[in-house]
Amino acid sequence: MAHNKHDQINPSPQMNELAEQIGKWALKLGFQHVGFSRPELPDAEVRLQNWITAGRHGDMSYMMKHGTKRSRPGELVPGTLTVISVRMDYLPEEPGNPKQLLEQPDKAYISRYALGRDYHKLVRRRLQQLADKITTKCGSFGYRAFVDSAPVLEKALAQNAGIGWIGKHTNLIDKNTGSWFFLGELFTDLPLPVNATPASNHCGSCTTCIDVCPTAAITGPYQLDARRCISYLTIEMRESIPEEFRKAIGNRIYGCDDCQLFCPWNKFARPTKEPDFAPRHGLNDVELCELFGWDEALWLERMAGSAIRRVGYEAWLRNIAVALGNATNSEAAVTALQKRIDDPSAIVKEHVLWALGEHAK
């Protein structure tokens, strides 16, 4: 691989000291890990292009519209010399094991990251506080904060910053704490010292994530077909969920965690200390029939400040209808579905009729 101009940066003693200070500030602000990397991502760029060319991004057209800005941070934010990557753990403290919910078809399974407050604002606010602290130390500097926003290959950057390795399920894993964490970045024009080597891969011969994926979305090691992924089907996609995947979705009404729930590295995961990530409105243990009964006003009220709100009420009902079709064949499930048989949304109605058909078999 060709060396580039950024490899020639020799940080001054002041920059070395600043990097050390940033690490301490980040921990005080509630981040669990911070690392530094140069912005170039040539290998990740090739992988991204191949993935898009294969059409595996599905309807996520935003994945291609930014051209090389996604893999070249210097094009997105001119002048970027160093990317500061941070990690914030989110696994909530729960009385039971989330795996048990998957075996209770009348209850809803919601991806653990979405049970509490929306992480975007919280992590972004902490990143801004980190930038403010850097400003007090070294004066005005150029930066931009990202939290799962804009065209940023955050996992590749975090891997280069030593925060973890990209596992076979394409999530980032830290060998001491697993993978239940959010990432955020500060693109800066500071010539900070960077991690000498990217985090090394410790997946070995394990294929658990590939084996447990309900819809076979992990088509091979490090290969994810978003079009088959339950997180994509229940969150990103707005149209009808293809019938071939509906049974496999089970009771997962918002996202899917199976590749993380069963990953051996997550036995080291520790619950978050962040109160904002605690489950709200009992969403970590709730009956599908109860959720299906929420009208739009109640849904909007309960979902205020939640990442779930971005899917919209229609997709929410669509997802629950599928889960109810997979629920125990009970009078409660059938009654709940029948109440929405004339739903004004054609998509909701279609999924309700499918679910009732499942109970009629």
Image (cartoon, helix red, strand yellow):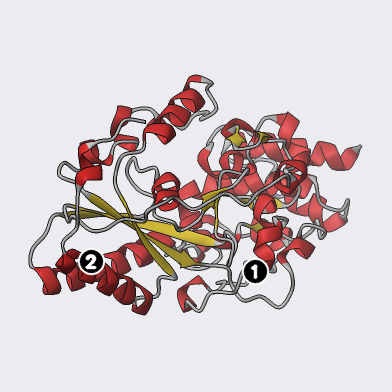
Residue that numbered label 1 is attached to:
268
- Residue 129 sits in quarter: bottom left
Label 2 CA crowd tier, 10 Å (few <14, some 14–19, many 20+):
some
| Residue 257 image position (x, y, % from top left) | 65, 54
35 with respect to 265 (left or right): left
* Quadrant (top left/top right/bottom left/bottom right) for the N terminus: top left
* Quadrant (top left/top right/bottom left/bottom right) for the C terminus: top right
311 with respect to 135 (left or right): right
- Residue 85 sits in quarter: bottom left
Of 72 and 146, the residue lying toward us: 72
Of 113 and 205, the residue lying toward us: 205
Task: First in sequence, mark 2 or 1: give its number.
Answer: 2
Q: Is residue 224 visible?
A: yes
Q: Amino acid at mark 2?
A: Asn
- Residue drawn 13% across the image and 69% down it: 135
Q: Residue furthest left?
A: 139
- Residue 96 sits in quarter: bottom right
Q: Are marks 2 and 1 in contact (CB under 8 Å)?
A: no
* Mark 1, secondary structure of its residue: helix
270 with respect to 15 (left or right): right
Residue that numbered label 2 is attached to:
16
- Residue drawn 65% across the image and 69% down it: 268
Of 171 and 346, the residue lying toward us: 171
339 with respect to 298 (left or right): right
Q: Amino acid at mark 1?
A: Phe
Above or below for 1 versus 252 = above
Exactly how many numbered labels are in the figure? 2
Above or below for 222 versus 52 = below
Q: Residue furthest top?
A: 53
